[in-house]
Image (cartoon, rainbow, N blue to C red):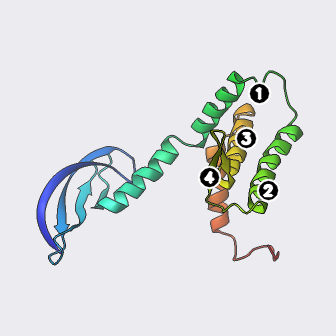
Amino acid sequence: MSLSTTSRMITACPKCQAKNEVIVGSFFNAITGLQERKVGRCVCSSCKHVWDFDEEENRKAQQKALIYRHGLNDLAAEVHEIAKSKGWWDEEKSFGDLTALIHSEISEAFEEYRNHHKPDETYLNDAKPEGIPIELADAVIRILDVCARYNIDFDAAVRQKIEFNKTRPTKHGGKKL
């Protein structure tokens, strides 16, 4: 690879998420002439953190940051407002009923599987999206709705559980599945 051009880009600091301008070099494959990647060294203007910039890694980091900046609690609030506006909260529901509704969406995903649909397949039925991914999305939507209703900090709960799972032994619990 050989350096052929430099350019300026905006990237977020991986430590504090402050926006920074970075000068990156575009490297090209000398044989094919195709651009391989853009790389550079960054110093955050806010926290002075130093890191190596790689365009592909930056893209992944920004997607991850977007998920966390507009995270599960934000989605939960949006989902709950939509559910209320559609009349789903005109009458109070028990927590048991709400968890049964979550379970029903998982059961619908399983029924899609039993009907020979692939796990990544979506299709339309009279303009309504259907398939395993849609039913799983419905389950997540119901979970988020419950979290918003009960003021559960779902972002924190998911992060706490992920961090705990990192500490668990392989196949903890000794169960078959």
Q: Give the residue at mark 2.
A: 111
Circle 3: residue type: Arg
Q: Residue at x 18, y 62 (%)?
A: 26
**Left or right: 123 with respect to 51?**
right
For residue 142, say whether it is visible. yes
User: Given contact means CB atoms under 8 Å apart, are the residues at marks 3 and 2 in contact?
Assistant: no
Which mark is on residue 142? 3
Q: Residues within 10 Å of mark 4 (few under 14, many from 20)?
A: some
User: Given contact means CB atoms under 8 Å apart, are the residues at marks 4 and 3 in contact?
Assistant: no
Q: Residue at x 84, y 26 (%)?
A: 92
- The CA distance from mark 3 to mark 2 is 18 Å
- The CA distance from mark 3 to mark 1 is 11 Å
Q: Quadrant of the C terminus?
A: bottom right
In front: 125, or 63? Answer: 125
Of the numbered discs 3 and 1, the one sitting upstream in the chain is: 1
Circle 4: residue type: Thr
Q: Give the residue at mark 4.
A: 122
Residue 43's image quarter? bottom left
Callout in the foreground (2, 1): 2
Of the numbered discs 2 and 1, the one sitting upstream in the chain is: 1
Of the numbered discs 2 and 4, the one sitting upstream in the chain is: 2
Disc 1 secondary structure class: loop
Q: Give the residue at mark 1.
A: 88
